[in-house]
Image (cartoon, helix red, strand yellow):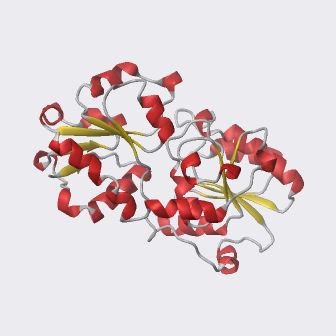
Amino acid sequence: MKIYLNKVNESWIIDRVRKDWYNHKKQISTRFIRNSDIIWIISPWVWKTIPKKYMINKKILCSYYHFDFENFDSSDFDELDQYVDQYHVISKKTKEDLSKLTNKKITSIPFWINQEIFFNIQDKKNLRNKYGFQDNDFLVGSFQRDTESSDLQSPKLIKGPDIFIELIDELYMNKPNLKVVLSGNNRQYVISKLENLDIPYKYFEMINLNKLNELYNLLDLYLVTSRIEGGPQAILESSITKTPILSTDVGVASEILHKDSIYDINNFSTAKPNVDYAFQSSREFTIPIGLNKFDKIFKDIHES
């Protein structure tokens, strides 16, 4: 059995997942689609780049991460669905959504977290000095994009940047030592709002994974404010680095975080990070445990 993962090359989490898979699953993988038995469409938005002859002649596993039904192209999905043997999703919430669209088998398994890249660093003082922060700064982080790439001004509402600003504004009134730590591309919306509110921030645009891990370890709080998500992987990254995190009830939040760490806009003030609970939950998805959870899916497809 040989598995091929399709490419996306967007410098995003899927590129990291693909790299991890090929590094750790060499015996059952191939980088040449013609030599594969199974095509894992890990990037479904570019599935049409796969030659149709392979879609017809190979077994197909397709991953989906979330569904924004207001902007959903049902015709594209229906065309792809005719080739797919089984689906994979990274949260139970997405499984519920996908089950409304297809009768094919769906397996929910969160993506693994690479503990050699993301881990706890205890020396916070030197880390803060390295990045120009003070010991008494209250640092709140957000490392996912918030602005639509179409115009670089409009908020990407499924990511909840408006919610993020509302919560930061509320926190800043009670914590004048608050500073926001941003990373990732397309952060124009949040940056403009922070500047309008005169809330201090530092922006580290596209950084390497070593620095990203250090940024997590700087934080007093990571905030997920999304309305719709598949993961987000930041939940696992925060959890394994022992970064305090609060999240809306999206994606894998309810599968990884303590119920007290999940909030809505009306009860945010009572939500509390539970670092130990999140850390223990995330350990179930470290390498190789998290990778090996996928073995059963491929065995099932290969033998069907």
Looking at the image, which is closer to me, 47 or 287?
Answer: 287
Note whether 258 is above or below 105 in the view shown.
below
Residue at point 81%, 71% (across, down): 136
Horizontal relation, residue 51 to residue 244: left or right: left
State the residue in front, 255 or 14.
255
Quadrant location of the C terminus?
Answer: top left
Instruction: Identify whether 132 is placed above or below 184.
Output: below
Q: At which x and y percent is residue 179? A: 76, 59
Is 219 placed left or right of 89 in the picture?
Answer: right
Image coords of residue 97 (percent x, y): 47, 29
Q: Residue at x 45, y 24 (%)?
A: 72
Label count reads: 0
Q: Nearer the viewer, residue 41 or 200?
A: 41
| Looking at the image, residue 52 lies above or below residue 197 | above
Quadrant hosting residue 125: bottom right
Using the image, determine if residue 225 lies above or below residue 137. above
Visible residue check, residue 5: no
Is residue 85 toward the left or the right of residue 212 in the image?
left
Q: Is residue 75 visible?
A: yes
Q: Is residue 293 left or right of residue 179?
A: left
Give the residue displayed 66% in from the left and 49% down from the top: 259
**Residue at x-position 87% and y-position 59%:** 176
Q: Position of residue 175 (x, y in %)?
A: 86, 58
Residue 276, picture quadrant: bottom right
